[in-house]
Amino acid sequence: MFEKAPIPVDLLDRTKSTPLIEVWYEIIQLKQLFRQGWIQRGIDPSACETVAEHTFGNAMLSLMLLPRHPELDALRVLKMALVHDVGEAYVGDITPSDNVPAQEKKAREAAAIQKILGKLPHGGALIEVWEEYEAQNTAEAKFVKQIDRLEFAMQASVYEHQGKIDGDEFYEKVAEQMTSPDLQAEMAALRTLLGKNA
């Protein structure tokens, strides 16, 4: 995995730290871990988003779009948007080109989530939120998954505007995954903005 620095938790004297400090030192690795798909497509590390930046984008999109979805549990959505990639602190940002089977990827991430959040007194509740996202069997989980895809397409559009990539493959793939009418509309608007066929 291409990262700015190794996970900083190894710098701690764990005999003196608290579970909160240790978890923070693990989660903060997401600021160091580049989104590997962009690196693989030639985005220079100086311009490449990190997993933490992607997570921020997901949380902000969720926050902005939640008023359109009063039927959803807003707090649950925001928790899910924030924890859905936490396991990558140890697992890394696995992409399809890594050829890791889906079940193996899920097992690795589940072990990492348990290792990280399991130290917290109320970590079990956050682990449940992550498991809900992975199961994709609630309206909140499906919404956050679509937000994750929309954020990906929006980041691709930024890189395209900067002349770094041609995002056609991303927009088409994401558009196919959108089932929410308002998110479909946002995706169509994004493609129109870029002069793509919506």
Image: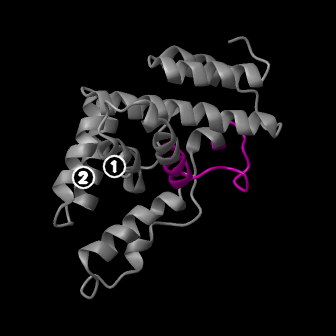
Horizontal and vertical percent position of residue 66? 43, 37
Find residue 120 and report its image quarter: bottom left
Q: Which residue is mark 1?
A: 79
Q: How many marks?
A: 2
Rate crowding at label 1 as few (under 14), some (14 to 19) or many (20 or more) other CA atoms within 10 Å: some
For residue 139, the mark is none
Question: For the residues carrying marks 2 and 1, which lies nearer the camera in this image?
Answer: 1
Q: Position of residue 47 (x, y in %)?
A: 72, 52
Question: Is residue 43 part of the magenta span, yes or no?
Answer: yes
119, 9: nearer the viewer: 119
Element type at marker 2? helix
CB under 8 Å between callouts 2 and 1? Answer: yes
- Given the image, on which type of amino acid does mark 2 rest? Leu
Residue 46 spot, x, y in % from top left: 73, 56
| Mark 2 lies on residue | 126
Answer with the quarter of the image where residue 9 lies: bottom left
The relative height of residue 70 versus residue 57 in the rendered view (above or below) is: above
What range of the chain is rendered magenta? 39-58
Question: Which percent across, then down, holds residue 19?
Answer: 25, 74
Circle 2 crowding by C-alpha within 10 Å: few under 14, some 14–19, many from 20:
many
